[in-house]
Image (cartoon, grey):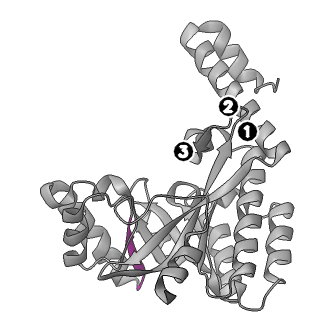
Amino acid sequence: MTALPMGLDMAAMDNPLNAAVVMRDRKVIDMVEQAIARRHMFLAYQPVFNAANHDQAVFYEGLMRLRDGSGRVIPAAQFIAITETSEIGRKIDCLALEEGLRALAQNERLQLSVNMSARSIGYSPWTDTLEAGLALSPTIAERLILEVTEASAMIMPDIVSAFMSRLQSVGIRFALDDFGAGYTSFRYLRDLLFDMVKIDGQFIRDISESPDNQVLTSALVEISRHFDMLTIAEGVEQAEDAAFVRSMGVDCVQGYLFGAPTENQPWNRQNSMATA
């Protein structure tokens, strides 16, 4: 069983609640390490559509999933917060990038986004994975989108800025994930120059009936438009909300209303339907 840092073990000795949290986190870390060792981690793909046209996906997002010993599929939301700050998080980023690059190499028409933490910048296995994947096809760079969470991007904005500039020069695009969920400094947003921002789903759910969400989302859209960043509404689940964000000028939409994440490659089915 993997040992957690001593500070966590000492905290557990002082408080039964802390002990329960430590034991839960240790179990999650063990589960993730086993999944990595067995390569039981994979991407589930969810489409992103033009807000005004839902006929064909603009691109897909690859979302990391884990299959545990009993065969259950577990989404990243249930383990990423516990693993992101450790090397395990870096390994997860490597696996996600590797699988995403493989999918891009197999389909020359595919555009795909893959999540990464800013903490993976400078992690040599991740960099090696990217370089090897880009070498598979001359068009992969321009079809790859790297999604960086707002929280991790703001930890080291100067490093993130230099990293983005270098990769944007070869055609890779960047999306700021969960925009509005954290504590973005607008000065950093100006300097980082993301290609697109994904407005956090907490502002999109029930937006057609929530004046608060309408005001907040409108502000995020205006900020993004000022910096020439494409806007994507995450977590769209109701037709009324999709219509509302379209009327606000949001460029793209993503959510269960348009398609759930699936392990099967949905672009193959979509292409078959289009040519039938």
The residue sitting at 61% across, 44% down in the picture is 80
Judging depth in this view, the residue of 197 and 31 nearest the camera is 31
User: Dot 3: what SS?
Assistant: helix
Mark 2: few/some/many CA within 10 Å (<14, 14-19, 20+): some
Q: Which residue is mark 1?
A: 32
**Residue 132 appears in the figure:** yes
For label 3, the residue is: 77
Measured from the top left, where is residue 263 in percent x and y? 61, 58
Query: Residue 46 location in percent, x, y?
Result: 51, 64
- Identify the residue under disc 2: 28
Highlighted range, magenta:
228-233
Q: Point out the image quarter for the N terminus.
A: top right
- Is 159 colored magenta in this rendering? no
Q: Is residue 72 above or below residue 217?
A: above
Above or below, 178 against 138 in this view is above
User: Residue drawn at (69%, 22%), measured in percent from left and top?
Assistant: 8
Q: Amino acid at mark 1?
A: Val
Q: Dot 3, crowdedness within 10 Å: few (<14), some or many (≥20)?
A: few
Quick check: 209 left or right of 230? left
Residues at marks 3 and 2 touching, judged by CB atoms closer than 8 Å: no
Residue 160 in picture, x, y percent from top left: 64, 69
- Element type where label 1 sits in the image: helix
Mark nearer the N terminus (3 vs 2): 2
**Residue flagged by tag 2: what amino acid is it?**
Val
The front one of 105 and 27 is 105
